[in-house]
Amino acid sequence: MEYKVNAGDGAFYGPKIDFHLEDCLGRTWQCGTIQLDFLMPEKFDLVYIGEDGVKHRPVMLHRVIFGSIERFIGILTEHFAGAFPLWLAPVQVKVLPITQRQLTYAREIKKLLDEQGFRVELDGRNEKVNYKIREAQVQKVPYMLVIGDREVDGALVSVRHRQLGDLGGMKPDKFVARIQKEIAGKALSPGTQLEGDVCKFGFGAM
C-alpha cells in the first residue's frame, strides 16, 4: 500500500501507522493509530516461552481506534458545527408549551418520550413561544414539540424540525415512530442514511 514517512514524528516506540479522518471542510485530523512498541517489553523485561521451549521477547502492539476521546469529540463537534444528527444530539427533543395552561399535557408528552429512552427536555418557563423556539434553535436541538390549546384538545404535538421547519400536527405515537426510525437508520441529516463504507460519524470513507 502507498504510505508516507513522517520523519521525526515522535513515534519513539517503533513504527506507527496513522489514520486521518477528513471533516466537512476538507481538513484531516490524525485519530486512529497502530504502533509497534519495542521499548516497553524491554523496560518491563517481558518474556514468553515459545514452542521451542525458549524465552522470547514479545513485541507490544498499541491500537487506538479514534485516538483520545477528548480529541475525537472535539473534531466531531467541529465537523457538525454543534448541530449533531438526532442519534448523537445531547438533547434530542424539546417540549415547548405555549402557555402555562398546557403544562400538564406537556409533562405527559415528556414522560412518554422519557419512557421510550429519548433525551428530552421540557421548557415550561413563562416566556413567549417564539423565544423558546429561537433558543432551542440556537442550542441546535433537532426536534421541538410546540403545544397549544389545539394540540391539547386533539391529543397532538406540533412538530418543528431544526432544519426542515414546521412539520405540522402529529399524534405522539406517530412522532415516536418517526424519530425511532431516524435514530435506527443513523441518519446524518433528514432523509439520509449511512451507506457502504462511510465512517459512522460522517467524516467520509476511511
Image (spheres, rainbow, N blue to C red):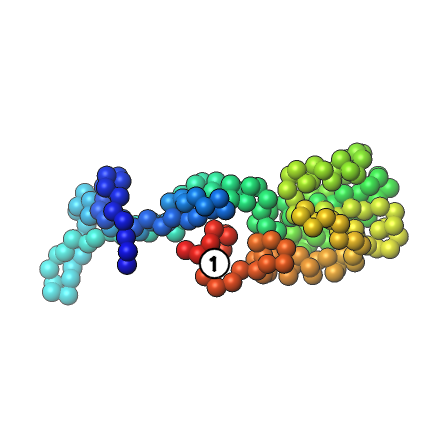
| Relative height, residue 198 to residue 25 (above, below) | below
Residue at the front extreme of this rendering = 26
Q: Residue at x 17, y 46 (%)?
A: 42
For label 1, the SS is loop
Could you tell me residue 196's position as x and y percent? 48, 64
Q: Residue at x 78, y 46 (%)?
A: 146
Please tell me how many numbered marks the rendered image carries: 1
Could you tell me residue 179's position as x and y percent? 66, 57
Question: Mark 1 Cα within 10 Å, few/some/many (few <14, many 20+)?
Answer: few
User: Relative to residue 73, is residue 53 drawn left or right?
Assistant: left
Q: Is residue 152 visible?
A: yes
Task: Tell me the amino acid under the disc marked 1.
Answer: Val
Q: Quadrant of the C terminus?
A: bottom left
Q: Is residue 87 visible?
A: no
Of residues 114 and 141, which is closer to you in this image? 141
Q: Residue at x 61, y 51 (%)?
A: 86
Of residues 109 and 183, which is closer to you in this image? 183
Of residues 95 and 108, which is closer to you in this image? 95
Q: Quadrant of the N terminus?
A: bottom left
Rendering quarter of residue 125: top right
Q: Residue at x 37, y 45 (%)?
A: 30
| Relative height, residue 13 to residue 204 (above, below) | above
Of residues 196 and 68, which is closer to you in this image? 196
Could you tell me residue 11's position as x and y percent? 25, 42
| Relative height, residue 48 to residue 10 (above, below) | below
User: Relative to residue 122, is residue 21 drawn left or right?
Assistant: left
Residue identified by numbered label 1: 198
